[in-house]
Amino acid sequence: MSTRIHLVGAAGQLGAAFAARTPADVDLVRYTSTDLDVTDAAQVRSALAELRPGETVVNAAAYTDVDGAQEDAAGAYAVNADGPGHLAAATAAAGARLVHVSTDYVFAPPPGQSAPLEPGDLDPAATPATVYGASKLAGERAARAADPSTTVVRTAWVYTGGLDSPDFVGTMRRLEAARPELSVVDDQRGSPTHVGDLADGLWELVGQVGEADDRTAGAVLHAAGGGEATWYDLACAVFAEIGADPARVHPCTTADFPRPAPRPAFSVLSGRSWAAAGLTPLPHWRGALSAALAPDARLLR
């Protein structure tokens, strides 16, 4: 592993978890949105001017407000599409490597899809159903065009488990304390992923960069929690883990809770590409949730 790793998006959910796991012998250079505006090509070139051959840039920066992106396409594309392209241009010029984190929202599976999604399942003519998904797909393509050695890592349904976290698990914990009952969508199926497990996976990938058996250069990989669940399944599991009665959670349909941006009915990510690259599969979502919500668990595990 290069002894110097550059982390873009260090203040975000994934960035914080990744930084918290930095090995003692690694110099992690962190960039928040205050330090580095990825939408500004000149600023990216300046900030990464000292990038050396063989070093790795991990891009965890993203515009993640799925509903907000529907009304702010320009903002979403600037961060999610232009940003990765600017970073990849810098890594290509320096002989470094970009590891870019993407999302299950790049897919628009047909009705009835039930097989976990592989990287190759993405049709070249794919049109994601949301601005967020379309901007992230554009970012994948921009990064790989600027630096063909870029590794794209798609993930899904990421959470920390913290009581104050704005993610789904944190929201369910707060609602359990505030409401006697609640309804949760049961017709959307995906891959719940603990942010700590994803961060561990990214560190393993970064450690492989430049090694003789590196199979990640130029690859598109899926890294998500094992198994699959609906939001209702996940909510029930959260209740069970914190000692609440899962019967207080009731299933409902997507139509019952319309949102500005349509959510995919099926976006389970297969982990076969990750394993084929010689990387350790992420833990099954149910065990990961249990570990995350254990009374003695650290917020970022």
Image (cartoon, rainbow, N blue to C red):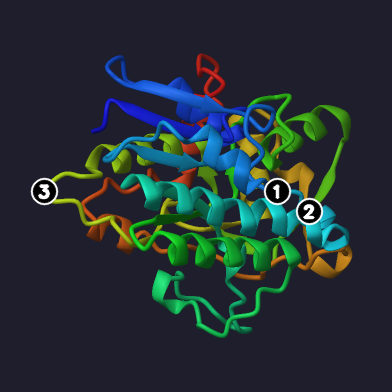
Instruction: For marks 2 and 1, give the one nearer the viewer.
Output: 2
Q: Is residue 86 above or below residue 266?
A: above
Residue 212 marker: 3
Q: Quadrant of the N terminus?
A: top left
- In which quarter of the view is residue 128 placed? bottom right
Say which amino acid is labelled 1.
Tyr
Residue at x 81%, y 64% (from the top left corner): 261
> Does the rendering let one see residue 187?
yes
Horizontally, residue 119 falls left or right of residue 31, namely left
Q: Is residue 249 above or below residue 243?
A: below
Of the two numbered discs 3 and 1 on the same chain, state the one appearing first in sequence. Answer: 1
User: Pointer 1: what residue?
Assistant: 63
User: Pointer 2: what residue?
Assistant: 75
Q: Is residue 265 above or below residue 289?
A: below
In space, the residues marked 3 and 1 are separated at their CA atoms by: 35 Å
Horizontally, residue 133 falls left or right of residue 281, namely right
Neighbourhood count class around disc 2 (C-alpha, 10 Å): few under 14, some 14–19, many 20 upward: some
Horizontal and vertical percent position of residue 10: 57, 29
Neighbourhood count class around disc 1 (C-alpha, 10 Å): few under 14, some 14–19, many 20 upward: some
Of the two numbered discs 3 and 2 on the same chain, state the one appearing first in sequence. Answer: 2
Give yes or no for contact between labels 3 and 1 (Cβ–Cβ under 8 Å): no
